[in-house]
Amino acid sequence: MSAPTDMRHRKLHRLAALIRKETRQMVRDPSSLAMGVVLPLILILLFGFGLSLDVHDVPLAIVMQQPSSDAVGLSEAFRLSSYFQPRFMHALPAAEQLLVSGKVHGILYIPQDFSSRLAVGDAQVQLIVEGSDANSARIIESYVEGAVGTWSAQRAAEGLSGGAAVAGPVNVETRLWFNEADESRYFLVPGLLVLVMTLIGGLLTAMVMAREWERGTLEALFVTPVRSDEILLGKTLPYFMLALAGFVLCVLSAQFLFHVPLRGSLWVLFGASMLYTLVALGIGLLISSAVKNQLVASQLVALTTFMPALMLSGFLFDLRSMPLVVRLVTYVLPARYYVKLLQNVFLAGNVWSVIVPNTAVLALMATGLAFASRAVTRKRLL
Amino acid sequence: MSSASTEAGAHAQRAPALLARELTRRFTPKDRPVVTALDAVSLAAYHGELTALVGPDGAGKTTLLRLAAGLIAPDGGSLAVLGVDVARDPQQVQDRISYMPQRFGLYEDLSVLENLELYADLHGVSAEQRAQRYPALFEMTALGPFRTRLAGQLSGGMKQKLGLACTLVRQPELLLLDEPTVGVDPLSRRELWEIVQHLVDDQGLTVLMSTAYLDEAERCSRSIVLYQGTVLTQGPPAEVAGGSAGACFLATPPPGQSARSVQAQLLDRPDVVDAVPDGGRVRVVTRGAHGEAAAQPLRGLSAEPVAARYEDGFMQLLQQRVSRERTQPLTIARPLSADSGQLAVRVQRLVKRFGAFVAVDHINFEVRRGEIFGVLGPNGAGKTTTFRMLCGLLAPSGGELYVAGANVRTAPAAARQRLGYVAQKFSLYGPLTVLENLEFFASAYGLRGEAKRARIAWALQQFELGDRAAAVSAQLPGGYKQRLAMAAALLHEPEILFLDEPTSGTDPLARRVFWRRITGLAEQGVTIIITTHFMQEAEYCDHVAIMDGGRVLAQGSPAEIRRRGQSAATPDPRMEDAFIAIVEEARAAAGRDAQAVA
C-alpha cells in the first residue's frame, strides 16, 4: 500500500470511529432523540391538525321574521351543517342579547320579504358577526357565505328560480374561502420542514460540540492522531442523517397524512432541504465551537436560527407585509431562501427562475459556514 | 550543585523525552491582571522513567502538561517532546503520546468497551494488536466484568482506571497524566499506582504525571517541584528529602497535652517549617541546620530525630521561597464550655435505603463535645449520605439520630439551628460577591440588624476575606472558596460543624492552614465532624471511623486505627496502610459470606 492511500485509509478509519461514537451518543441521549424525532412528530401533528383553520359547531342565532318555506329551507341548510349550531329565533333584540352575552357568535337575519324578493331574484340576508376576534369572525363570515351559497346553488341545480340571484349579497368567492381553510394546511405542513431542519441542524449540533467542551472530553480527543476536520465531519454526518430522517418524516406526512400536493420535483425539494440542513449544521457547529457552553450555545442558536425561521422566514407571516427594515434583515436569514424554495416546489412546481437563485444563496452560505467552522475548530484549548 | 552534575552523568547517554527551555506561558483572564502560569522554566523528563510534577495549586502543572500535549501554545521559550518542537508540529506529538486530562476525558454515555474501541480506532490499533492488548488492560484494571457498563455509571476509581486504559490502547512513547489520583480513595489510588509502576518497570513506559500527593512523588524516579510558575528543584526525590535531613523529629507531647495542641504551638513558631500530628506524636521539621540548632524549637519536649521524608523536604523548599501564611487561629465570640463529658452527636443503628440499595447499613457512633471526629472511606462508602442525615437534609430509613441534644428525626429544625454544614462542592452562590454570600447566609440563619453586621464583620476578619469582600465568589481561588464556605457555615455560631471533604483538591500548604483553623475551633469547644480522602489528615482527629459499603468497619483514635494495619510487611503502618488493610479485610470477609450464602 502506498503512503498516501495508507494515510487516507487511516483517515477514513478515524472518521468512521467518530461517526460510530456520535451515533451511539445520539441514540442514547434522550434529549437528542426527543429533539430529533419526538419534536418533529409533535410539530407535524400540531400544525397538521391543530392549526388548521377549521371551526366546528359555531353557535349561530338565526332570526326568521316570517317562516316562509324558503326561509325555513335556508335555515335547514344551517341545521344540517356540521359547522353550525343554530338557534332559531323570531326577534332581533333577543338574538342581539345572546350575541352580547357571548352565547352566540353571529346572527343570521332573514328579513320578512326574503321569499318575495327571492322570487324576483333579489333576496338579501343580513349577517352580524361578533368581531372581537377578527380571525374567527372572518372564518364565520366565510362559512355563512358558503352555506348560503351552497343552498342557493342547490336550488339552482334543482331548477328553482332565484338560485343564482340569492347570491347577490353573498360573495361567489365563498367557495374559495372554504378552500383556504384546507389550504392553510397545504401551506403549513411544508413550512414545517423549515422548523424541523432548523431544530435538528442548528439546535442539536449546537449542543453536542459545546457538551464535549463542557465535559472535558475534547481535551482527551485532541491528543490523538485525529484531525480537526475529522472531528467536524464526525459531528456533522450523524446529525445530517438525523435531519434526513426528519425530512422524510415531514414529506411522508405531507403526502399521505395531509395530502398536500407536491407540484415540483422531489429531487429539487430534496436538494434544497439538504443544502439548508448543511447551513443549519454549520451555524450550530460554529456557535457551539465558539461559545463552548451548552446553555449559551442553545440560546444563541435558538435566537439566530429557530426564532427567525418561525417568524421571519415567510413561513407564518408574509414577508411583504413587514416593515422595510425587518424585510432587509430577512435577507441574511437562510430560512428565508429555504421557505421560498419550499413554497415553490410544493405549491407552484419547478419554477427555475426561483429555484436557481435561492439555491445558489444557500450553497454559498453552506460553503462559507463550512470554512468558518473549520477555522474555529482548532485542536487548541484556548 | 553536585547533585545536578551526577544527574547529568546518569542521563548523559539518554535523550530527554521532554525538554523545556525558558518555557513561558501567560494567561489573560477577563478583567484581571495577566497571570504568568509558567515563567521561563527549564526542565527535563527522561525516557523509561516515571517523573512526578509536584507543587501547590497554581504552580503551573496543568499548563505544562497541556503545553506538552500541544493543547496550548507557549508565549516564549521552547518545548521539545520526543525531539519534536510541539509548538511547530503538535499533531506529530499527539500521534505519538497519550494524555489523560484531570477529568479523564471519558464519554459517559459510551460503555467501557466502546470508550476503549474509540481510542483504539483513533490510534489506528489493528485487530491483532487489540486481541493482545485488551485482555491485558482488562486484567490490569479489573474492568473486565464491566465492559458493557456505561462509563457514567462507574465509580470514581473505575473511571480513572478506564481513563488510563484508554491512554494505553497502544504503547505511547510518552504518557502524560494530569493529577490522575485526585479525589480518589486510597484503595483506587494504590491500584492505579501499581498499574503505572508495573508499566514503567516492565515495559519501559515513559510517564510524566502531576500530583498533589507528595508520597506519590517519593515513589517516582524523578520529581520536578513547581511553585508559582518556576522550578524549585528537579532530580531524584531523595534529593528533596535530603534537603531536610537532620531537621526532622518526632516529638512526644508532655502528659496532659494533646498532640494536636503541641502541633499547633509548634506550627506557630517561626523556626518551625512544618508540624503535623503523627500517631499521637508530632512530626516536626525545623528551620535550623543539623545538630543542636535544629532541635532548638523542641526544647522541653522529648523528641527523637527521624529520617527525612519527601514531604519534609518539600515543605522546607517551599518555606525558602514563601513565608508561610501564619494565620491567627480562629476565635469565636462565645467559646463553648469544653465539657467533654457531653455528647454532641449520637448515632444508633442508622439506616438509609435508596430502593433496594442500602447506602448506610446500621451504623453506630458517638462524638463528644469539642472533639474532631473523622469519617474516612472510599467513594460510595456512605459518608455523604450519613452527613446529610445528620444535618436533617435526608430522612433516615431507620435508627436514631441525636445532634446537640435534639432528635433530628422529630425536631430537625432545632438540630439544624445548632449545626453548620459545609457541603462537598461548597454551596456558594457563584455570581454573588463574598459579602453578598455572607449576607444571604446570615439572613437565612435568621440574623438581623446589629447581630448580623457583627457576625459578618467577624467572618470577614477571622477568615481573612476582607480584601476580597467585593469579589465575585465564582472567580475566587479554591482556598478562598473554602474559607468563605466555612465562614458562611459558622455565621450562626453553631456548636457542631460538619465538613464534607473540605480539603479535596487543595495543596499541602493550604491544608496546613485549614487544619490550624479547625483545631482552633475545636479547642474553643466546637465539635467538628469531617470527611477526607487524605489519610494523613485523620491524624488531626480525636476519633476516626472507617466506612465502606455503608458500614463502619473500625473506630478509634488514630493510633489505635494505625495499629490495626500492623503486619510483618508494615511494622510501622501509616494511616493509609491501616485504612487499606481494614477495608480489604472487610471486603474479603464479605466475599466469604457471600460465597457461604451461595
Image (cartoon, helix red, strand yellow):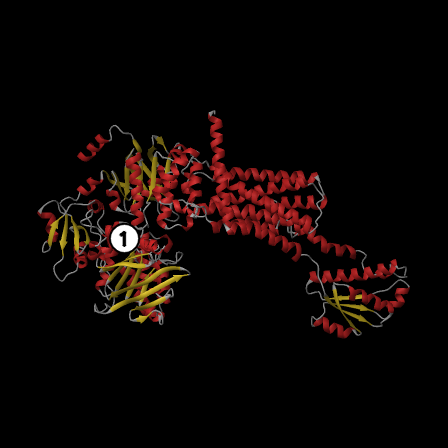
- Residue B55 position, x and y percent, is 27, 45
Q: Nearer the viewer, residue A136 or A67?
A: A67
- Residue B339 position, x and y percent, is 21, 69
Q: Tell me if mark 1 has few (under 14), some (14-19) or many (20+) residues whose alpha carbon lies within 10 angstroms of its own.
A: few
| Amino acid type, residue under disc 1 in the picture | Glu
Tell whether B376 sits left or right of A251. Answer: left
Quarter of the rendering containing residue A337? top right
- Residue B124 in sight here: no
Quarter of the rendering containing residue B117? top left
Subunit that carries the residue with mark 1: B
Tell whether A23 sits left or right of B578. Answer: right
- Residue drawn at the location 65% of the way across and 58% of the way down: A50
- Residue B280 in sight here: yes
- Residue drawn at the location 49% of the way across and 46% of the way down: A25
- Residue drawn at the location 66% of the way across and 45% of the way down: A342
Q: Which element is circle 1 on?
A: helix
Q: Nearer the viewer, residue A102 or B395?
A: B395
Q: Nearer the viewer, residue B363 or A176?
A: B363
- Residue A362 position, x and y percent, is 60, 40
Tell whether B569 sits left or right of B414. Answer: left
Quadrant placement of the C terminus of chain B: bottom left
Which residue in the protein does label 1 denote?
B585
Residue at the limit of the structure toward the top, as seen here: A2
